[in-house]
Amino acid sequence: MSGAAILASRAALRAGAGLVTAAVPESQQPIVAAALPEALTLALAETAEGGLRAESLGRLLAAHKSRGFTALAIGPGLGARPDAAKAVIGALGSLLIPAVVDADALNVLALQPRDQVRALLQRRGSPCVFTPHPGEAARLLRLKTRQIQEGRRLRAAQLAEAFGCVCVLKGSGTVVTDGKSFWINTTGNPGLAKGGAGDVLTGIIAGIWAQRLAAGGPEAALEAAALGTYLHGLAADGAVRTKTTLALLASDVIEALPDAIRKTGLR
């Protein structure tokens, strides 16, 4: 789903990332490049169905060696076929930079034994931010979605502790936690339930995190996740005034980001 990759990449750029590379299956590269004139693109090996091949990891690592990527956003539009799953595991195990893990990347991890995923993430030596919606969180924790919604703060903390990550449990009153500190988001509106909004959030967090890393500190992941979530909702609240909740699009949230950033006093 190239649209998801486009939305996440554009959001990262709008959030302040200086240079973004969208790594996509080679048949999708011309589409993504045409939609993202401000970004670089990287064509990866693909299967006959157009999904990522496990062998695509080599090209990604070669690009990292030459370009020096700062942060990784993985999952939007990826698909969860076996080859894509191998690519996700390989990327997280070999591309040892801070990572925002979303969508199908979370679904891939949910299918693996939890202790193996935890060990993989610990070996990385770089933090991860997970951005699940309640259904994805339920799959990761082997629970029902209802159980996630009945105790959102508790379940977000359990997920953060189980995987050693920062968890952004999306939904009304998004919970952001590293298992110890908690942020409950107060911005946003029902228009964010529309498809693509989660991809935008992933890009915003990655774009902010890439900048926060320059300041260092173990709290950078939690701060980037909390600030990204707040800005995402604030931009949606600004956009909905003219677009309405019914008509709000994920791309409208991206276009409203400059005003949201200005309101927070960021530059």
Image: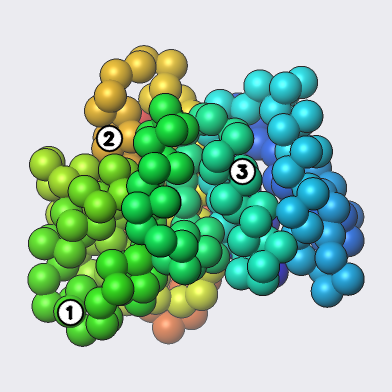
- Proximity of marks 1 and 3: CB atoms separated by less than 8 Å: no
Name the amino acid, label 2: Glu
Q: State the residue position of label 2.
A: 223
Whether residue 33 is visible here, answered yes or no, is no
- Proximity of marks 2 and 3: CB atoms separated by less than 8 Å: no
Q: Residues within 10 Å of mark 2 (few under 14, many from 20)?
A: some
For this rendering, which residue is in front, 115 or 249? 115
SS state under label 3: helix
SS state under label 2: helix
Q: State the residue position of label 1.
A: 147
Question: Quadrant of the rendered structure where residue 185 is?
Answer: bottom left
Q: State the residue position of label 3.
A: 91
Question: Quadrant of the rendered structure where residue 1 is?
Answer: bottom right
Name the spot of residue 248 as percent of width and height, x first: 47, 73
Name the amino acid, label 1: Gln
For this rendering, which residue is in front, 112 or 99? 112
Name the spot of residue 83 as percent of width and height, x first: 71, 63
- Between disc 1 and disc 2, whose residue precedes? 1
In the figure, is residue 229 to the left or right of 26? left
Q: Residues within 10 Å of mark 1 (few under 14, many from 20)?
A: few
Q: Residues within 10 Å of mark 3 (few under 14, many from 20)?
A: many
Image point 60% across, 53% down: which residue?
Answer: 88
Name the spot of residue 94 as percent of width and height, x first: 60, 35
Image point 78% across, 38% down: which residue?
Answer: 58
Name the spot of residue 108 as percent of width and height, x first: 52, 64
- Between disc 2 and disc 3, whose residue precedes? 3
Nearest to the eye among marks 1 and 2: give it.
Answer: 1
Image point 12% across, 61% down: which residue?
Answer: 153
